[in-house]
Structure formats: C-alpha cells, structure tokens
Amino acid sequence: LQEAAGARVDGAFGPRTLAAVERMDPAALIERFAAIRLAFLKRLRHWRTFGRGWENRLNRVTEKALRQSRVCPHCGEPL
C-alpha cells in the first residue's frame, strides 16, 4: 500500500502513509496496488503453474474494489 500511495515503504502504517493514501484518487490507488501485486506474483517461482489463477483472482478483487470505491460507504449512493 505504501508503494502504491507513493509513501516511504517502511512497513508501518502511520500518519504519513495515511496522508499519502488520502491524497490519491481511490481508483488510481487500487489500480497501482493491483499492478504492484501482479508484478510480485510474476516473480514467484510457481508463477508458471499457478499464475493464471492468481491473476484471475487479482482481477476479480480489483474489479470489486473499483466498484466499491464508486459507492458511498455510509449510504450506498454512487459517488
């Protein structure tokens, strides 16, 4: 998340990470996070065996996150 938000990657979610996340467009953050995750998965030695399933799952999760990012979490109305 820190890398996707452009924050310093230190493994601690603090005020600087939160500020970086809040500055980003939610859809852009989701897309960047997914791209970073996919790049990580492709570096794993079992990518050739399981990669298609991992990528399909990542795509489903990303699409769901993008849909949810366009809806108010309090009232369910489109943003």
Image: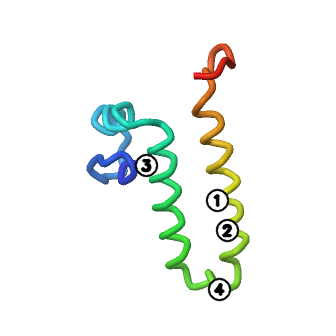
**Residue at the location (60% across, 41% down)?**
66
* Residue ID at (67%, 68%): 54
User: Quarter holding the C terminus?
Assistant: top right
Q: How crowded is the residue under tag 2: few (<14 C-alpha within 10 Å), some, or many (20+)?
A: some
Q: Secondary structure at mark 3?
A: loop
Q: Earlier in the sequence, mark 2 or mark 4?
A: 4
- Between residues 5 and 9, which one lies in front from this camera angle? 5
Up-down relation of residue 17 to residue 58 (above or below):
above
Which residue is located at x 38 percent, y 37 percent? Answer: 24
Q: Dot 4 corresponds to which residue? A: 48
In what element is the residue under mark 4?
Answer: helix
The label on residue 58 is 1
Q: Do the residues bearing badges 2 and 1 touch, measured as CB atoms within 8 Å? A: yes
Q: Quadrant of residue 76?
A: top right
Q: Is residue 3 left or right of residue 55?
A: left
* Cα–Cα span, label 3 and label 2: 19 Å
Above or below residue 53? Residue 10 is above
Circle nearer the viewer, 3 or 1: 1
Amino acid type, residue under disc 3 in the picture: Leu
Q: Which residue is mark 2?
A: 54
- Classify residue 19 by image quadrant: top left
Q: Earlier in the sequence, mark 3 or mark 2?
A: 3
Q: CA distance from mark 4 to mark 1?
A: 16 Å
The kind of secondary structure element at disc 2 is helix
Q: Earlier in the sequence, mark 4 or mark 3?
A: 3
Look at the picture and state if 56 lies above or below 18. Answer: below
The residue beneath circle 3 is 1
| Quadrant assignment, res 53 | bottom right
Disc 4 residue crowd, few under 14, some 14–19, many 20+, Cα 10 Å = few
Estimate the x, y position of residue 48 in percent, counting from the top left.
65, 85
Q: What type is the residue that disc 4 sits on?
A: Arg
